[in-house]
């Protein structure tokens, strides 16, 4: 049992070691390097600087909750009254928003 625990611990050291895991900077470098093919000198240097300093694309925002939709639609319906407001709110709240 002790040998099995020791082997599992040793395996975890290798698996979770940052030297063995590819990180985001390495993948970004590989991607920028691939995109920079054909560029040389200062042009390549400038491209790589911009590419490596660029922020990763933001993940898609989570869909709005019903409460958030209600606040947004309510703010947009301030100038409407009566049936116009009712129709606007129905249409606004039924739209899928992200």
Image (cartoon, rainbow, N blue to C red):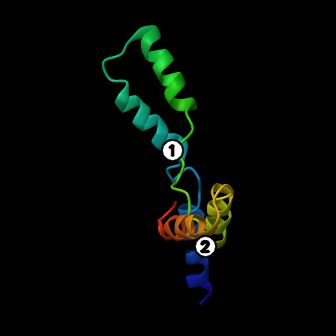
What is the secondary structure assignment of the residue under circle 1?
Answer: loop
Q: Is residue 34 left or right of residue 57?
A: left
Q: Nearer the viewer, residue 21 or 1?
A: 21
Q: Find residue 57 and name its label.
A: 1
- Extreme residue toward the bottom, this view: 1
Give the residue displayed 54% in from the left and 23% down from the top. Answer: 49
Taking depth in this image into account, of 40 and 76 the one nearest to the observer is 76
Residue marked by disc 2: 66
Q: Tell me if label 1 and label 2 are in contact, CB under 8 Å.
A: no
Q: Can see residue 18?
A: yes
Upstream in sequence: badge 1 or badge 2: 1
**Neighbour tally class for label 1: few under 14, some 14-19, many 20 plus, Cα within 10 Å:** few
Q: Residue furthest top?
A: 42
Rounded to the nearest angstrom, the CA distance separating label 1 from label 2 is: 26 Å
Residue positioned 62% across, 86% down in the render:
2
Q: What is the number of callouts on the image?
A: 2
Query: Which residue ends up furthest to the left in the rendered image?
Result: 38
């Amino acid at each position: 049992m002790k040998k099995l625990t020791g082997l599992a611990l040793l395996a975890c050291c290798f698996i979770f070691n940052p030297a063995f895991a590819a990180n985001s900077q390495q993948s970004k470098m590989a991607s920028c390097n691939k995109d920079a093919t054909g560029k040389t000198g200062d042009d390549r240097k400038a491209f790589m600087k911009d590419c490596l300093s660029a922020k990763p694309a933001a993940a898609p925002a989570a869909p709005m909750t019903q409460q958030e939709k209600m606040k947004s639609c309510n703010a947009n319906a301030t100038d409407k009254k009566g049936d116009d407001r009712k129709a606007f709110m129905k249409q606004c709240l039924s739209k899928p928003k992200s």
